[in-house]
Every structure is written in structure tokens, then in C-alpha cells.
Image: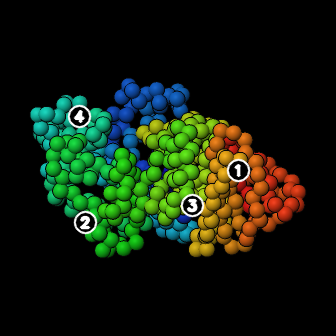
């Protein structure tokens, strides 16, 4: 077995993404489910994905899903202790905050919580199909955790949100998590909204996210609640007390080349209530999905007033999406161009001082084509981003303004190309190809 994460953790300290981040979300820290492991190793439809990233594939390469949680205690691969105190202290010594997963919809089918609390989980009625339920050794047939659009996750058991005791159990679990972290990322948080639960399971829910969050914050007032959320439920969850929610809409718009939607979203004051990303464990790698545009799109998101979610390996330009059940994969060669870009980008972003950060949005048309322009001022440095969202080449002049003065040359952080400048009273000259982004420092 590999050494616990708490022993290997110092090796992460000097990585550029780690230095740049304010918060570290560690996925898969909770106790691994033996049943989830055996199901993953034997499920035929999962094997092609496993073999894409590991060949020859060995049984020990597959560890089980981190979202079929056996218990909210550390997995031996994460900590040799029975709690995460050492990891939590180490993160804080490095002036970072620790975010952990809370999976509110379900537990692993072999969780000891089923034995100790058999009536907190949803018992199947005659309308539930066999593929969406399982017979537990205690004699009850339980429903698998699921969302309304797909069959159940076969390594999970669904909490019964029609039972008010579930809410109390969640509060108890969350207060224990709050002892060793600064917040939780709540997996598929919208599944607990009463009408969503009723649509999925045809049963009334009494679960109230607001009551849960408020109760936890009575003891831990600064504890963060982040929601993985889809289907237009984001504002509802914010109203229930979540600090921020996923914003997949901008990701989808970039994927579908709906640039007007992207520019409108970027111009909004997101006030850090939106979590934006180019890749995460559920999506394809950014380099695979967006190609060279991944550099430009990350640059755009970095000028957005949001919480920017960065996935391990994104800065290396890796192409292969790793299934969450995998614990060992073949090494993948990094992309030098992507690595160089993220070195430039993250070093620049890490110098921003959030207490003095000022976003100056602008939006202009040049010869009838829209150009997205935004500057960020922090300390004695001004960053300027330009994006041609049109389908034709655009050029023009940007007048000098406070913080943006003449320089003999400007280096575009996106492409790493230096542009000599000719002094002119008209300002700074630019020329952008369709969908091109440039990022300059003054």
C-alpha cells in the first residue's frame, strides 16, 4: 500500500497550482467501500475507461468510487490516524484552507450506518425496479442512490429524505467534518431539494438545506458550503445558504461556441457565488475538450469574478480523463506549451491581492465587431485582457488610461509572444484573429 497522503503531502507544497490556490479540495479522503471496489472491478461497462489509462489493467489499480462513502472517517491511504487533524493543520500552516467532500444523497451499500440506522435509508416499494434496488443482509430492500434522469448508482444506498431523522444525522456528520476542514463541496446538492427528490422517488421530502446549514454554522460560523448543482437550481441553493454553486453554463457555452453567452456571463458581477471551471473529475480534460483554446478560455475565466476551480494535471495539458475509481494509472507525458502557459498565468494570478483587487469591465465594438476588454488593477500592476468573440479578424487602438501606459514591448501571456510597440497618441494597437485572447501586464 502507498504511504498515506499526510506523509507524502509536503511534496505538493511547492507545486505552482498549490501555491496559487486559496483553498485545497481533496477528493476521495473518506473510507473506501470494499463493495464499491468489487463492483467497479467487475462491472463490464467501466473496463474500457480503466484500460484507456492503465495497461495492463490490474485489479489493484481500481479502488472504488470516492462517492460511495463507507464512513466519514479517513481512508488509510489518506491518513494513518482516525481523523484528518494532521492534514488540516498542515494545510493551515501553508496558509491554505481545506475543503472536503460531503455526499448528501447516498452512502455505500455496505456502510455500517445501514446496520446502525436501518430506517434512515430509502426502502424500495413495488414500483422500484430490481436494477435500482438491492437486498441488504438486514432483510430490507433498499433503493440505490440516483438522480431523476438515470438509473441508480449500484454501489450506493439512498438516504430517505422523508424521514426527519436524516437531517439530524447529516448535521451530526457535518459538525464532525467541520472539526477538520474549512468547508464542504456538497456532491449533487440539488438532489435534496424536495421537488427534485419527489420527482426522483415519488416521496415527499422534509429535508431543509437552510436549516442544516444554519444549524452547523451555529457552532462553525465560517464554515463554507459549496454546491455541485445543475438544472437551473443554482439560485435556489444560494437562497438556502450555500456560499457558492457550480456554474456549468459557461463551460457548456464555451464547448458549444456560444460566445455571446460567455461574454455576457463574464460581464456580470458574479461576486464569487459562482464556481467556474474548464475541467473537473466529471468532465473531459480541458486540453482534450478545447485543444489550444484551453489556454485562451482559462485566461477568460481568470478575469471573471468567480471561484475558479482548477483540476490536478490541468496545468500539464494532460489529455486522458481518469475514472474516479482508479488509484493507479500509466504516466502521461505533459504538454510543454501548456505547462509554460500555466506557469505564466498562475504566477501572475498568484500576485493578485484580493483585498485591493479592482475589476474594470469594458466592452467595445471595432468596425462592427464586439471585443471583450477587461482590466484588473492590483497594487502597482495592471492586467489587460482582450477577446475577439467574432468570427473575423479585428484590429484597432485602445486609448491609454490609468494603469495602462506606453511600453516598448508587451508579452502576451496566452501565447508567450512578445509584441514590440510603436509609441502613438492613439494608445495601444491590437490585432486579433477570430476567438483570439490576449493577456498583457503593465
Coordinates of residue 255 in the picture (x, y in percent): 53, 39
Position of 107 compared to 279: left or right?
A: left
What crowding class fits label 4: few (fewer than 14 Cα within 10 Å), some (14-19), or many (20 or more)? some
Residue corresponding to mark 3: 21
Residue 47's quadrant in the figure?
A: top left
> For numbered disc 3, what is the local secondary structure?
loop
Camera-near label (1 vs 4) is 1
Q: Which mark is residue 211?
A: 2
Q: Quadrant of residue 123?
A: top left
Colour mapping = rainbow
Q: Position of residue 91 (x, y in %)?
A: 51, 65
Density class for disc 3 (Cα within 10 Å; few <14, some 14-19, many ≥20) is some
Instruction: Tell me which residue sits at (57%, 60%) in the image.
Output: 21
What separation in Å lies between label 4 and label 2 (alpha carbons)?
A: 30 Å
Q: Disc number at residue 366? A: 1
Which is nearer the N-term, disc 4 or disc 2? Answer: 4
* Mark with earlier residue (2, 1): 2
Where does the image place residue 382, in percent across and percent down from the top left?
71, 66
Percent of width and height locating residue 26? 47, 54
3D distance between C-alphas at marks 1 and 4: 57 Å
Residue on which the image places disc 4: 132
Amino acid at each position: 500500500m502507498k504511504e498515506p497522503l499526510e506523509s507524502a503531502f509536503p511534496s505538493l507544497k511547492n507545486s505552482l497550482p498549490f501555491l496559487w490556490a486559496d483553498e485545497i479540495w481533496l477528493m476521495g479522503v473518506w473510507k473506501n467501500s470494499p463493495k464499491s471496489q468489487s463492483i467497479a472491478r467487475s462491472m463490464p461497462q467501466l473496463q474500457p475507461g480503466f484500460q484507456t489509462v492503465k495497461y495492463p489493467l490490474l485489479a489493484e489499480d481500481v479502488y472504488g468510487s470516492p462517492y460511495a462513502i463507507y464512513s466519514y472517517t479517513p481512508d488509510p491511504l489518506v491518513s494513518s490516524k482516525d481523523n484528518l487533524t494532521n492534514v488540516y493543520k498542515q494545510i493551515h500552516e501553508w496558509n491554505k484552507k481545506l475543503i472536503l467532500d460531503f455526499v448528501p444523497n447516498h452512502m455505500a451499500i455496505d456502510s455500517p450506518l445501514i446496520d446502525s440506522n436501518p430506517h434512515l435509508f430509502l426502502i424500495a416499494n413495488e414500483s422500484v425496479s430490481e436494477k435500482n434496488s438491492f437486498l441488504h443482509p438486514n432483510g430490507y430492500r433498499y433503493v440505490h442512490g440516483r438522480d431523476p434522469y438515470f438509473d441508480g448508482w449500484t454501489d450506493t444506498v439512498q438516504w430517505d429524505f422523508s424521514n426527519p431523522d436524516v437531517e439530524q444525522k447529516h448535521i451530526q456528520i457535518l459538525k464532525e467534518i467541520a472539526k477538520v476542514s474549512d468547508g464542504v463541496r456538497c456532491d449533487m446538492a440539488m438532489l435534496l431539494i424536495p421537488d427534485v427528490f419527489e420527482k426522483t422517488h415519488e416521496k415527499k421530502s422534509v429535508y431543509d438545506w437552510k436549516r442544516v446549514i444554519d444549524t452547523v454554522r451555529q457552532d462553525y460560523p465560517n464554515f463554507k458550503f459549496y454546491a455541485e448543482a445543475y438544472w437551473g437550481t443554482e439560485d435556489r441553493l444560494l437562497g438556502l445558504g450555500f456560499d457558492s454553486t457550480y456554474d456549468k453554463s459557461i463551460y457548456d457555452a464555451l464547448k458549444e461556441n456560444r460566445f455571446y453567452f460567455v461574454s455576457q456571463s463574464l460581464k456580470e458581477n458574479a461576486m464569487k457565488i459562482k464556481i467556474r471551471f474548464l475541467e473537473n473529475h466529471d468532465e473531459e480534460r480541458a486540453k482534450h475538450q478545447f485543444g489550444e483554446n484551453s489556454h485562451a478560455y482559462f485566461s477568460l475565466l481568470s478575469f471573471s469574478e468567480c471561484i475558479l476551480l482548477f483540476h490536478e494535471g490541468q496545468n500539464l495539458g494532460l489529455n486522458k480523463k481518469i475514472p474516479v475509481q482508479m488509484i493507479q494509472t500509466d504516466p502521461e507525458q505533459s504538454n510543454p506549451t501548456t505547462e509554460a502557459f500555466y506557469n505564466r498565468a498562475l504566477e501572475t494570478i498568484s500576485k493578485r491581492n484580493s483585498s485591493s483587487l479592482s475589476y474594470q469591465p469594458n466592452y467595445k465594438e471595432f468596425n462592427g465587431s464586439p471585443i471583450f476588454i477587461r482590466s484588473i488593477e492590483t497594487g502597482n500592476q495592471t492586467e489587460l485582457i482582450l477577446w475577439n468573440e467574432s468570427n473575423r479578424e479585428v484590429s484597432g487602438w485602445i486609448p491609454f488610461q490609468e494603469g495602462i501606459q506606453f511600453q516598448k514591448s508587451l508579452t502576451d501571456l496566452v501565447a508567450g509572444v512578445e509584441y514590440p510597440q510603436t509609441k502613438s497618441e492613439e494608445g495601444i494597437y491590437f490585432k486579433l484573429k477570430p476567438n483570439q485572447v490576449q493577456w498583457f501586464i503593465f
